[in-house]
Amino acid sequence: MSLEAYSRTKDGGTLLSPNFRVREFACRDGSDPVFIDSALVDLLQRIRDHFGQPVTITSGYRTARHNAAVGGAAFSQHCYGRAADIRVKEVAVDTLADYAETLLPGTGGIGRYPEKKGRACGWVHLDVRAAKARWTG
């Protein structure tokens, strides 16, 4: 794992892997810089390759202020550039999370957020923390 700092404005178009650019991980509050762990990029690329469909990052790096504003956990892995909330078109939350489990068998975080009333669509939270964590939200 290697944590890197990028500039949203200067490096936004920079490819981190064959299918992911810096701007996809940027905090939704528009701030600079953007912190991204290379292990997270590798994980997402493996998911992209497996399903053969684009991976949409709905939330990547978050500043502490933005994390608090969206109700994130106090020590969210998003704040350390180690997490992404993702969707893959036409892939169910459980299918995506189950595949992620094969890539993170004894480590990392996998949170399942299925579709439900009041939630337009589901997503999966993935992170590359050292410890194993699993939950449904």
Image: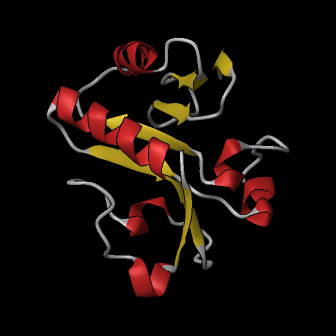
Foreground of the two, 116 or 86: 86
Give the residue furthest to the front: 2
Residue at point 37%, 42% (across, down): 42
Rendered image quadrant of residue 45: top left
The image shows a total of numbered marks equal to 0
Q: Position of residue 107 (x, y in %)?
A: 59, 20
Residue at point 65%, 33% (across, down): 129
**46 relative position to 61: left or right:** left
Foreground of the two, 71 or 85: 85
Foreground of the two, 45 or 51: 45
Q: Position of residue 36 (x, y in %)?
A: 53, 58
Rendered image quadrant of residue 99: top left
- 96 up-or-down from 16: above or below: above
Give the residue furthest to the right: 74
Foreground of the two, 64 or 40: 40
Residue at point 50%, 12% (across, down): 105
According to the image, what is the colour scheme of the structure? secondary structure
Q: Quadrant of the C terminus?
A: top right
Residue at point 40%, 80% (across, down): 11
- 118 up-or-down from 64: above or below: above
Q: Position of residue 75 (x, y in %)?
A: 82, 44
Give the residue furthest to the bottom: 10
**72 relative position to 3: left or right:** right
Q: Position of residue 116 (x, y in %)?
A: 53, 23
**75 relative position to 113: left or right:** right
